[in-house]
Image (cartoon, helix red, strand yellow):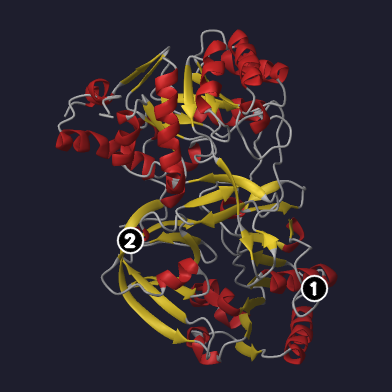
Amino acid sequence: MSSLDTIVRLPGLTLKNPVLTASGTFGYGLEFARYGNLADLGGIVVKGLSLKPRQGNPMPRIAETPCGMLNAIGIQNIGVEAFLRDKLPFLPWRETAVIANLYACDAHEFGELAAVLASVEGMAALEVNVSCPNVKEGGVAFGQNPGQIRAVTEEVKRNAGSKPVIVKLSPNVTDIADAARAAVDGGADMLSCINTLMGMAVDIRTRKPRLANVYGGLSGPAIKPVALRCVHQVCRAVSVPVIGVGGIASAEDILDFILVGAHAVQVGTANFMRPDAAFRMASELPALMEKLGIGGLDDFRGSLRA
Amino acid sequence: MLASRNNCQDLRVVRMTPLGGGEGAPPLFELVLSPPGWDFRPGQFVMIRPPEWGLDLVWGRPLSIADVREDGLRLLVQAIGRGTRRLSELRPGQVVTVWGPLGNSFAVEPDKPTLLLAGGIGIAPFVGYARRHPKPENVTLLFGHRLPAESYPLADFGGLRKAEAVREQNPEQLARFIDHLGQTMRGYAHGGLVLACGPEPFLRTVRKLALTLKARAQLSLENRMACGVGACLGCVARNGKDQLVQTCTHGPVFWAEDVFLSEDAAPLGGKP
């Protein structure tokens, strides 16, 4: 099967295949260069970046749960300046899409960050994190308020120049379609959904929460049904492309998300299950499509018989 | 052949050898995996995750490389949690996914008197260290443990100048061991090298003694990890510059004065 069959055309962005990596699960990309060819991926969404470096939350900040994990990292990152200086030049951005994930405390700061990243060659798109459950300021508070989502999106879009803007939605809302419409009203070119689900784990021996932050974001195969439902709902609510995220651990999972309407996917916790997971999924997808008689992703997308 | 570059490979279980344990205690076993063509430096570790875990347990488990010999990669495992208990059920012929070798390694200073301090399953990285040391006559092992001595591969330390195993089964024995630890470390305070691996209360005690005695000491941390490659940021420790560093990639071995251990957990043999 020709590799052309897995090309994904998005607004202002073409991916060689629909397999992206999810922010926070793939470091700055370079950590995984020993486990596969980064250029073989559709794209790399790097660890959430803020204007200044952030230390994140206290330890312990990860916990394994049935078919998933909780994290409360709290956007620990090296800051945009160090990323542009020490990481981006070493990523194969001419061969694959490198996408920044933006985190800020208010709309103005989001705009400032977007302006810095938009001016850089090698940055294919900007993903706006309005949905991190692990930070007190901003974070999921933005993602739960359609007005805030719209305001942040407008500010980022205003500063993003020609770079496509993706808004990452939170599942921790009553109606994710409302959030999706707010992002699109604000000018989002694409949406990614979902971010992690708020959860907790406790230890009956110590009687303590397993995370110092008490609550954390649940990810992994456990959340895939929720993510699939959210993508389905969002695809029916808006007309911009949607990138599915949540529990994708196989090529079959990728097609599940495309079947309900996603254009591409992001592989997250599976990168921890084995570090070559995303590479393997990208390479296995064409053969699976052939086996299932799927001639191209465009034809298959959204073909769910429901 | 797998060289020293980090890689992700499916290895086959050659042998599972029960090493023992005590009544009601978590059993220890040696896991040998092939192909054997691994290069490593003692102190490094691998992540291991059997594909048959499916979607159930999502993390691999970090295990110190005990040694690599002709028959394969050797790991010591104590079946203490969900993952290690599942590992104890592996049988010859089964396949496990392994990535590594990961992390840095213990210092090797052949002409310096070197003291290996192991607590329980923390003895694992010292198997290869002792066997590969260019001058084993300069190396001494002091090993504190709770399970019977035959549960551990002590025969592997036969080439050392001295190997001493001290079993602690009650608080008095533990207190005596800590005294002995301090006395022994004192002999390495000037011009020697102290290397430690074991549970965090043990490491905290060693660190405190090392700083008091001004001994050059390295500690191997056993933090919880999800990825092992520096991406998840779940295993961070605070270094001497008050920066957060990933234990998996900046460690697991740190100089005692260059790492802070959490202060809220109980020290060895004492109250918080």
**Figure quadrant of the N terminus of chain B:** bottom left
Q: Which residue lies under the disc numbered 2?
A: B52
Q: Could you tell me which chain the residue with mark 1 belongs to?
A: B
Q: Position of residue A117 (x, y in %)?
A: 59, 18
Within-10-Å neighbours for mark 2: few <14, some 14–19, many 20+: few
Q: Is residue B192 visible?
A: no
Q: Quadrant of residue B184?
A: bottom right
Q: Residue at x 58, y 36 (%)?
A: A172
Q: Are marks 2 and 1 in contact (CB under 8 Å)?
A: no
Task: Work out whether residue A229 or residue A91 is closer to the camera in this orientation and state it.
Answer: A229
Q: CA distance from mark 2 to mark 1?
A: 44 Å
Q: Secondary structure at mark 1?
A: helix
Is A139 in front, or is B170?
Answer: A139
User: Which quarter of the figure has residue B25?
Assistant: bottom right
Where A7 sits versus B101, above or below?
A: above
Which numbered circle lies on residue B209?
1
- In-image side of A152 versus B27 (left or right): right
Amino acid tagged 2: Glu
Q: What amino acid type should be assigned to the residue bearing mark 1?
A: Leu
Depth check, front residue: B162 or B178: B178
- In the picture, residue A156 is in which quadrant? top right
Q: Position of residue A276 (x, y in %)?
A: 38, 45
Which chain is disc 2 placed on?
B
Residue A273 higher or lower than A114, as above or below? below
Position of residue A95 measured from the top left corner of the image (x, y, whole percent): 38, 24
Disc ID at residue B170: none
Across the whole image, how many numbered discs are drawn on residues? Answer: 2
Neighbor class of circle 1 (other Cα within 10 Å; few <14, some 14-19, many 20+) is: many
Please indicate whether residue B166 sits to the left or right of residue B40 in the image: right
Q: Quadrant of the C terminus of chain B?
A: bottom right
Viewer can see residue A248: yes
